[in-house]
Structure formats: C-alpha cells, structure tokens
Image (spheres, rainbow, N blue to C red):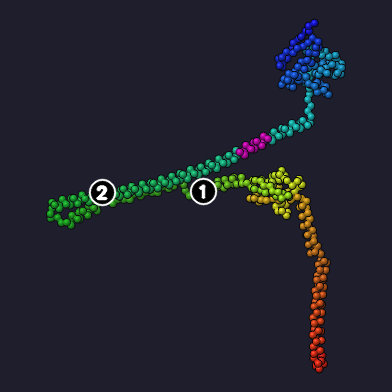
Amino acid sequence: MSRQYYVHSCQFCNRTIQLESHHTDINQLIEEHLTSCKYDALDKDKHSCSLADCFVKQTFKNICNDCTLNFCDSHKKATDHSCSSVFSWKNASNNPAPQAPKKVIIENEYLRAQKNQKVELDKLRKEMAQNKQELKIREEKSVEELNSDLIFLEQQQVLYDQIKSNNQNSNNNNNNNNNNNNNNNNNNNNNNNNNNNNNNNNNFSDNNNINFSNNYDKSSSSSSNVTPPQPVVTKKKQGLQSKAEKDQIEELRKIRENRKLEYESDDISVCVTVILSNNDKLTAQFNKQDTLKKIQEFVNRNRSDGEEPYALCLNATGQPLSKNDINKTLQQLQLLPTPTLYVILIKDLKEQIKEVKRANNLRGYFFSNKYLEMAILAAALFFAYYLYKNYQKETLGNRNRHHHRDHHHRGDYDDYYDYY
C-alpha cells in the first residue's frame, strides 16, 4: 500500500520538506528542519516560552486562545501551563491566534552596571583621543610658528644684505662717474691748451714784432679761463632698518631659540639604574618629566628578589624617599643625569632604624644622666689619688735606701749629720 507524501517549502532556505500523512504536528517537523538548516536569522526570529522556568525558543508561535500567550511545544497544552481553555494546537498553523502582548524585559542590576561602565569607558576613550589630537595640533602649531619666525628673520636678513650691497654698488658707480668726469675735463683742458698754442704760433708767424712774453700771457689767460671740475656730492642712503628694529629682531631671535631649546630639552632621556636587594641591576631609559611612581612600577614588573615590601633609597645604607616624592618628577628630585637607586627591604630598614635608636639612646643615657657623670668624675679622681700615693711610696723608699747607705759610710760624723 503506497504512502502519501506532502511537501512543504521552508520560508528561510527555500528547500522542500517531506511530510508524511501520519505526522500530526507540522510545526514540530519544520522546527527540526530549521535546526539542521543553520540559518543566520534563526536566533533573531525565535520566540521564547512565556513560562518563567522555561528558556526554550522556537521559530513558530504556539499562542493560547484563552490567555493569548506564546508557549513551546512541551507547554502548549492548557494542562501544562495551568490554563482553563483547551488549546487547539493542531490547527494553530491554519488558524492563527491573536498576537501576544509584548513582554517587558527587566534588566538585572549587574547588566545595567556593565552597560554604564561600557558607556563611561567609551566616553573616556573619546576624551583621550580628543586630548591626543589637541596636543598634536598644538605641537604642530608651535613648530610651524617657530619655522615661520625663523623664515621671516632670514628674509629680513637677506633684504638687509641686498640693500647694503646696492648702496655699496651705487657709491662705487658714483665714484667711477666722478673719475670719468674728471678725466673728460682734463682732456678738454688739454685740447684748449693745444688750440691756444696753435693760435699763438700763427700770430707769431704773422707778427714778428710780438714778444714771446705776450704769447705766454695769452696762453696763461686762456688756461685760467677754464673752469675746474666740480666734485659730485653723493648723499649716503639711510638703511631701511634702524638700530631699534635690529635690536627687536635680535631679541625675537633669542626668545625663539630659548623656546626651541626648552621644547627640545623635554625629550632628554635619563638612564636610571636600580640595584635590588640581591645585588641585581635594572637599567632603563626615562624622561626627565617622568615621576618616581613610574620607576616604582618598572621595578615591580621586573623584580627578581621576591615580593616583599621595599623602599627606594638614595644610598645603600638608607635615606629612603618619602611618600610625597612619588608624584614628583626626576627633575624636581634632582636625579639627573644618571641616578642610581637602591631597593632596601622594609625589614632591613627597621633593623637599621632600631640600631640607630639604640646608639642614640646609649649616648643620651651616658651624657644626659647627671648622677652617672658625677660618679664617673669621682672614680677618675680616686684613680688619680691612688696613682699619686703609689708615686709617693716609691720615692720615699728610694730615699730611705740612700740614707741607710750613707749612714754606714759616714763613721764619726753620724751625730753631726743627724743633728743637721
């Protein structure tokens, strides 16, 4: 006996689904097909079950006729979700029920906090990006201003040099013209003298009675009538730049150079060496505007002597830096150009401090207690008196020995020596 087959097309992948006659629930079979179809929009189009304990999602709706809520296949009957109506789930695909009301989604406080943190992080990132852009723009503007000022100064210097050279050339040309005029005047004078001489010769030939002295007077008079060349006076052109302008330009140049040096000096690198408690060395390059906190973070990252608390010191014996110095720069702390810092554990520092305190206490005890000072002075005096007595005994013993020896050798003069 042949079976009857039905074909239904999928609305997502447009494939045909083979349905047998004994299948009563068409939606269930389509749901199984859609799980194997792996369509990208299935998660978006799926609908969740209305029960609080159920988290199943399906593409097709199973809406109850009485309560008008959507349920999954396992809770679609009235007895499953405690509804009084009898749900005709067989004809749900043919007789669509009214749409269920929209579900109000209540967010958890944790999710809200996460969203707020994301929003704040995005704002901070945007502000950081804006600040970086503003700093770049300022740096570019400062560099452009310096370059423009230097170009302007160079142009002014070129103009000044050109004007100076033009003035020199004009003076040289005027001098050359004056020399040429003088030469021309001299030539004219020579020509006039020659003409006069010729005339005199002619007159001498015509008139023999004329004396040579008269001819000489005429020539002298003709030569005296010639006007001497007048010198051409050339006024010196004043320069376009006065002394005040030159002083202003030099001041501007000095200011720009100082600013440029300050701008370049911010990038000076400082080689910092840190000696750990196990005598290992750490070296790194820092900027002079970096703080002590940055060096402390570098030491925390690269320590090889354990994780015990420590203090950064300027000397191996001690002298630790205070908490107020953490936010100060290397330039403010005067740790330039190649500073060396020592890592000393807090235990060792405490022991050193205790030893120093003990020594100070002993000094204070010996030099502050008056009764103890008086006792020391009395002992010193007693010791001096004891030494003095011993000295007297020794000297008297020596004298008695000499007296006994003299008495044995004196003879009859014993009474005389004893008397005196």
Instruction: Give the quarter of the figure containing the C terminus.
Output: bottom right
> Does 64 sit above or below residue 113?
above
Q: Is residue 293 visible?
A: no
Q: Position of residue 240 (x, y in %)?
A: 45, 46
Residue 259: x %, y % from top left: 57, 46
Quadrant of the rendered image containing residue 116: top right
- 185 up-or-down from 383: above or below: above
User: Does 342 sit left or right of 228 as displayed?
Assistant: right
Q: Is residue 297 above or below residue 58?
A: below
Residue 132: say if magenta.
yes
Q: Residue at x 73, y 18 (%)?
A: 37
CA separation in Å, label 2 and label 1: 54 Å
**Residue 250 badge:** 1
Question: What amino acid is at disc 2?
Answer: Asn
Where is mark 2, residue-wise? 188
Q: Residue at x 78, y 7 (%)?
A: 3
**Most prominent secondary structure in the magenta stretch?**
helix
Say which amino acid is labelled 1. Answer: Glu
Indicate the quadrant where residue 408 lies.
bottom right
Give the image quarter of residue 49. top right
Q: From which residue to which does the magenta span run?
A: 125-136
The location of residue 45, given as percent across then percent down, is: 74, 20
Q: Secondary structure at mark 1?
A: helix
Q: On the rendered image, what quadrant is the N terminus found in?
A: top right
Please name whichever residue, 157 or 88, is drawn nearer the observer in this view of the structure. 88
Q: Residue 302 in the image: state x and y as whole percent.
A: 71, 44
Tell me the residue at 18%/50% (across/down): 198
